[in-house]
Every structure is written in C-alpha cells, then in structure tokens.
C-alpha cells in the first residue's frame, strides 16, 4: 500500500506558483466532472486582466497552497472578493478539504460592519456531496442563489453559417490596436452596467494570458464603427476546450441576433482547430439560459452559494 505523502500548507510566493496552480487546473479536467475546478481562463484573468501587470493581483490576494515535500501541488484556495473563497483541489487529495475550509474561515472571512458578525461564502456544485457535507458540519447554510455551467460537445453536428443583421460586420479583434481595446472596454461597461473596464487591462490580458487566441476573440461591428457585440473564447489547448467568456451585446444593439452569429462563428473556428467541446458559465437569469439552450448548450451542473455567519 502506498503511503500518503506528507502535505504542507504555505502562502503563494511568486509567479512560478501561478504556473503550477494553472497546471493543476488543466491536469484535473480529464479526471473530474465539468467545472469541478476553475477553468484556467479564470485564473489567467486574475493574473493578467489588469492594467498594471507588475502589481500581480494574485500575489496581493491571500492565496494558500497545499503541497508535498517534493513540490507536488495538491490544491489551493483563493478569494475573488471580500468574504468569499474558492477551493481548487486534485481529486486524489480531497481528504484535505476539511483543513482547507478551516483555513478559509480563519483567513478569508470578513466582519459585517453593522452586525459585527463574521461572514463567509463559498459556491459549491450541487453534485458535490462531500463538500456540502463538510460545509454543513461547520455551520454553513445553503442559499437560494447560485449559477450554472453549460456544456456543448461540438461533434459532427451541422453548424449553420452565421448571419449578421444588415450593416453589421464580423471580425476578430486586434489587441495591438489601442482603439480596439478601448471599444472592447466601452462595450463591456455598457453591456454589464459597469464603469471600471479600460483598454489597458484588456490589452494586457490579450497579450500575455496563455489562454487568449486572437482568432477566437470576435466582435460584431456596428455601421458607425462601434463594437455592438463581443465574445471571447479562451482556449484550453491541452484539453481542446473552448470557454465562452464573456458573451455580451451593447444594449443599443440587442435583439438583432448578433450574439448568436458570433457564437456560431466561434463554433466553426473551434471545430477548425480541433476543439472537442465548449463551456459557458451563467448565472440563474432565465433569458440568458434560454439563449444558451437554443445555441445547443446543456446544463452540466448547478452551483449554489453556501454561507456562514458567526
């Protein structure tokens, strides 16, 4: 019988750790259910979607790694925002999750300014009975909100040709053109009701994130030259998977079939490079999920927030 290797926890130290963290995400795709861990695009965004790359947002976060004496990475935990946590773990080391959750409670919980109580939230897949049990035992309660991941196997199904509304054109973005980057930022802000997106963060992601591919970064251009719709398809080359993120249309150009045309073009391009499948993460909004269903995506899993206050 093989002995369980000693595992030690430590904070993330440097950019070399990022590459090891990324590799764990890629390596676990074939041996876990869809979206058991993050797709590598999400981690790439934490590292490169930043107007100041030298700031390295990952290193500014509390990130804890669990590894063997030989440097084998068993898993890690990081936060996206205040009072949340995300566990990434190799399935061979799931016995560590109780220890990981204990660290999360100590390091990542926030204090509510009004009540003075500690707060913490994790999002857990509905199929993950083990993690739900661990959280319930520690006093977490499942909330009524969450999201889902949708999946599409490309296979040999017939793919319609994309058709754009009159006056609109389809092309790939040009991250070397700062004007393109500004138009992407403007579209993201308008589509998602934000103000913080800027040209530099998008340009850095496009230039340096390993998952970015120019030929899979597509826009619908309006007659006035503005960007009317946009889809990015980061690509997991090892697992031959496209990840649709983001998918958005400017409010002034909705209901023209632009997102559908871009997604169809994305399907064709993915198939041309040998992709096997694609995923898209969604919230629980009914119209968005109806759209993805119409595009051929099926629900791979639901996830729900689990929350603790103490």
Image (tube, rainbow, N blue to C red):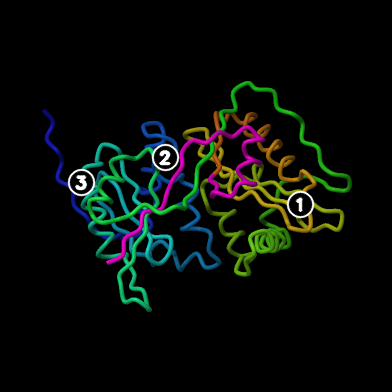
Contact, mark 1 vs mark 2 (Cβ under 8 Å): no
Label 3: which secondary element: strand
Q: Return the x and y of residue 157 as percentages of the image width and height.
A: 65, 22
Label 2: which secondary element: helix
User: Residues under labels 3 and 1: Cα distance?
Assistant: 51 Å
The residue pinned by badge 1 equals: 254
Q: Is residue 263 visible?
A: yes
Label 1: which secondary element: loop
Identify whether 51 is placed above or below 278: below
* 253 and 77: which is toward the camera: 253
Q: Which residues are magenta?
A: 281-310
With 43 as the anchor, is 136 left or right in this view? left
Residue 308 painted magenta: yes
Q: Quadrant of residue 153?
A: top right
User: Residues under labels 1 and 2: Cα distance?
Assistant: 35 Å
- Which mark is on residue 68? 3
Q: Return the x and y of residue 126 as percentages of the image width and height.
A: 39, 41
- Which mark is on residue 231? none
* 45 and 167: which is toward the camera: 167
User: Residues under labels 3 and 2: Cα distance?
Assistant: 19 Å
Q: Check disc 2: other Cα within 10 Å, few if <14, some if 14-19, many if 20+.
A: some
Q: Check disc 1: other Cα within 10 Å, few if <14, some if 14-19, many if 20+.
A: some
The residue pinned by badge 2 equals: 26
Question: Which residue does the image show at 36% across and 74% down from the upper left?
Answer: 112
Task: Indicate which disc, 3 or 2, sits on the residue closer to the N terminus.
Answer: 2
Image quadrant occupied by the N terminus: top left
Contact, mark 3 vs mark 1 (Cβ under 8 Å): no
Identify whether 92 is placed above or below 70: above
């Amino acid at each position: 019988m093989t002995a369980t290797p000693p595992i030690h926890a430590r904070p993330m130290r440097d950019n070399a750790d990022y590459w090891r963290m990324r590799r764990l995400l890629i390596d676990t795709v074939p041996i876990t259910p869809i979206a058991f861990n993050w797709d590598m695009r999400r981690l790439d965004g934490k590292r490169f979607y930043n107007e100041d790359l030298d700031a390295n947002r990952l290193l500014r976060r509390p990130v804890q790694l669990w590894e063997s004496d030989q440097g084998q990475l068993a898993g890690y935990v990081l936060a996206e925002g205040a009072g949340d946590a995300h566990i990434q773990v190799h399935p061979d080391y799931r016995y560590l999750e109780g220890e990981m959750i204990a660290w999360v409670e100590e390091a990542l919980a926030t204090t509510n300014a009004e009540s003075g109580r500690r707060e913490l939230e994790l999002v857990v897949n509905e199929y993950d009975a083990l993690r739900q049990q661990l959280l319930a035992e520690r006093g977490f309660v499942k909330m009524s909100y969450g999201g889902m991941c949708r999946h599409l196997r490309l296979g040999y199904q017939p793919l319609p040709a994309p058709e754009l509304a009159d006056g609109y054109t389809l092309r790939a973005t040009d991250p070397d053109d700062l004007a393109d980057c500004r138009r992407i930022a403007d579209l993201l802000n308008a589509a998602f009701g934000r103000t913080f997106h800027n040209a530099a963060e998008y340009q850095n992601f496009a230039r340096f994130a390993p998952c970015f591919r120019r030929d899979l970064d597509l826009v619908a251009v309006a007659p006035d030259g503005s960007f009317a719709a946009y889809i990015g398809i980061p690509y997991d080359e090892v697992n031959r998977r496209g990840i649709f993120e983001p998918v958005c249309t400017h409010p002034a150009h909705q209901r023209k079939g632009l997102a559908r045309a871009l997604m169809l073009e994305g399907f064709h391009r993915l198939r041309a490079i040998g992709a096997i499948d694609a995923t898209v993460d969604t919230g629980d909004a009914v119209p968005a999920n109806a759209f993805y269903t119409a595009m051929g995506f099926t629900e791979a899993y639901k996830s729900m927030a689990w929350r603790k206050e103490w």
